[in-house]
Image (spheres, rainbow, N blue to C red):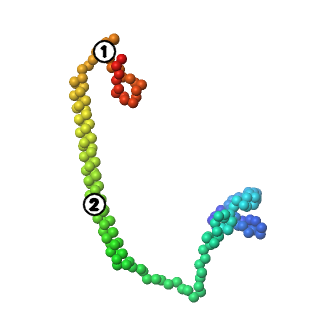
Amino acid sequence: MDDGLETKGKGEENTFPVIISSKLTKTQEDELVKVLQSHKQALEWTISDTKGISPSICAHHILWETSAEPVRQPQHRLNPVVLDVVKAEVLKLLEMSASGEHRKLQIQELEEMRNGAYECTKIYKEKTKAFHDKRTSRKQFVVGHKVLLYQSRLRLFPGKLRTR
């Protein structure tokens, strides 16, 4: 038994042993035993008490013969046909690891190309924006002129303009 634990008998003639802490006082032990006795139906003391499980399923009996002695059996070897299949599978997996390294390099190159394309697209958009901004004339708005207004209530199309 571990340090700090002790076995106490519970029930008629101590038929149900209970493992409790040895650090409990006598009154605490008595209270614990009273609680356990009052809730006897809730606790499963043996496998047969467990509802829904047959004890025959839980019981594992090994029949021992007095004349039987343990025997060391020789190591089993694979069938030659199965051995060839296993060898082929191992070689295939080894080739896959070599091709996997090649595939990783290809993925890295593809990622570098994507990053380069992203940078080119960013530069193109900046140049296009600068070009259009140069071509756009600045307007002087005067009170009373008709202009296109941005309708902020329509959030479906943020660039939607309407006449007024």
Q: Position of residue 127 (x, y in %)?
A: 22, 32
Left or right: residue 153 compared with residue 42: left
Dot label at residue 163: none
Residue type at tag 2 = Ser
Task: Write down the residue under mark 1.
Answer: 141
Residue 36 makes an appearance in the image: no
Q: Secondary structure at mark 2?
A: helix
Measure the C-alpha gap from mark 2 to mark 1: 66 Å
Residue at 70% over, 67% down: 17
What is the residue that sits farthest to the top in this orientation? 144
In this figure, what is the number of numbered marks? 2
Residue 154 makes an appearance in the image: yes
Asked if labels 1 and 2 touch by Cβ distance under 8 angstroms, the answer is no
Left or right: residue 37 compared with residue 65: right
Which of the 4 quarters of the picture holds residue 123?
A: top left
Classify 163 as above or below 28: above
Residue at 36% over, 17% down: 164
What is the residue that sits farthest to the right in this orientation? 12
- Quarter of the image for the N terminus: give it: bottom right
Q: Secondary structure at mark 1?
A: loop
Disc 1: CA contacts within 10 A as few (<14), some (14-19) or many (>=20): few
Task: Write down the residue under mark 2.
Answer: 99
What is the residue that sits farthest to the bottom in this orientation? 67
Residue type at tag 1 = Phe
